[in-house]
Image: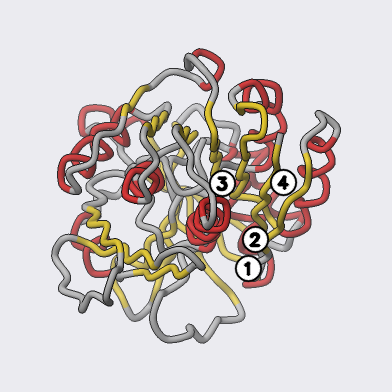
């Protein structure tokens, strides 16, 4: 499951099968709490915000940092998540309690997700040695810098707007890898809205493939590819079933999944090619890195934005 690439979508005819979980705890352990909620089965998380009735959207298991002014962090934070009615709530309660969090459950409450998404998404600019990339929602106007690459995104029901540190560092790593090199092929594992695959094509990579296990995310990615007039191949296949190998492979997913997929990801890298791993908490970085170095990959660069880490490795 992607860190910023899985849709938060529940069909109307199945909403009766879901329950709403409200979890509250200290700000410092918010990432651990988010991860536990996602691992328990929630397709997304909403942060409850007293100033905004619907809260601030948090994509998948990660915190959506504002691209604008710095945020004043509260002492305590409250998340709203959704689980299937048959989920093991007791186990979740026990795991949250270990990190100082408490939770309660209630029946599913319908919310105006689309309105909140649109109000919370802001333009993001990533600058590297080779280029500057501006990712903007379709409904906002932003002044373009000379030579800047523009990517317009309509998130729809999927996550992946470029605003989170894990996505930003993936883009920075792509700019680093491509600064003085050419790449013929690119694979995005957990593509979400397709933003990374679209960026690869706009950076003149000849072939870009995006895969995601969520059909709703793929639908949004196809729409965004058309919107940006980019030709990317999209598929719901697991990474092990994708044909061929690639010059650049990016996986912005949870650390546990990265470790499980190590052999499949390794096989998809061409000799001399690059692997970019993101969606990793800072304290998990060395563990994930050791797993991949054990396969024979070379450590090229590590990004450590706040609580997160991204790794650049080479085969």
Split into 4 quadrants, where in the image is the C terminus?
A: top right
User: Tags 1 and 2 in contact by the CB under 8 Å rule?
Assistant: yes
The CA distance from mark 4 to mark 2 is 25 Å
Assess disc 1: are there few (<14), some (14-19) or many (≥20) residues with their C-alpha within 10 Å of its C-alpha.
Answer: some
Q: State the residue in front, 173 or 263.
A: 173
Report the mark closest to the observer, 4 or 1.
1
Identify the element where label 4 is drawn. Answer: helix
Judged by depth in the image, the label closer to the viewer, 3 or 2, is 2
Label 3 to label 2, Cα distance in Å? 18 Å
Where does residue 271 sit, x and y in percent of width and height? 66, 27
Residue wearing tag 4:
94
Residue for badge 2: 308
The residue at which mark 1 appears reads as 305
Pointer 3 or 1: first along the chain: 3
Residue at point 49% right, 61% down?
Answer: 168
- On the image, the x and y values in percent for residue 165 come to 53, 63
């Amino acid at each position: 499951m992607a860190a910023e690439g899985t849709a938060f979508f529940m069909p109307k005819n199945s909403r009766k099968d879901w329950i709403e979980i409200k979890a509250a705890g200290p700000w410092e352990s918010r990432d651990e709490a988010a991860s536990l909620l996602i691992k328990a089965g929630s397709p997304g998380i909403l942060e409850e915000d007293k100033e905004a009735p619907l809260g601030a959207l948090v994509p998948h298991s990660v915190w959506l940092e504002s691209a604008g002014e710095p945020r004043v962090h509260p002492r305590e934070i409250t998340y709203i998540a959704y689980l299937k009615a048959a989920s093991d709530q007791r186990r979740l309660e026990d795991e949250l309690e270990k990190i100082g969090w408490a939770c309660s459950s209630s029946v599913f409450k319908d919310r105006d997700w689309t309105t909140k998404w649109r109000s919370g998404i802001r333009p993001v600019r990533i600058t590297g040695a080779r280029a500057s990339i501006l990712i903007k929602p379709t409904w906002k106007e932003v002044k373009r810098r000379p030579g800047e690459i523009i990517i317009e995104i309509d998130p729809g029901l999927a996550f992946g707007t470029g605003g989170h540190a894990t996505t930003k560092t993936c883009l920075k790593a792509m700019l680093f890898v491509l600064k003085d090199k050419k790449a013929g092929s690119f694979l995005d594992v957990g593509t979400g809205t397709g933003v990374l695959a679209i960026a690869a094509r706009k950076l003149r990579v000849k072939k870009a493939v995006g895969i995601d296990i969520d059909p709703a995310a793929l639908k949004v990615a196809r729409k965004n590819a058309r919107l940006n007039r980019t030709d990317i191949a999209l598929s719901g296949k697991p990474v092990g079933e994708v044909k061929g190998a690639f010059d650049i492979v990016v996986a912005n997913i949870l650390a546990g999944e990265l470790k499980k997929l190590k052999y499949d990801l390794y096989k998809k890298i061409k000799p001399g090619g690059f692997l970019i791993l993101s969606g990793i908490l800072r304290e998990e970085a060395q563990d994930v890195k050791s797993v991949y170095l054990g396969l024979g990959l070379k450590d090229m660069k590590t990004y450590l934005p706040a609580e997160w880490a991204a790794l650049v490795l080479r085969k």
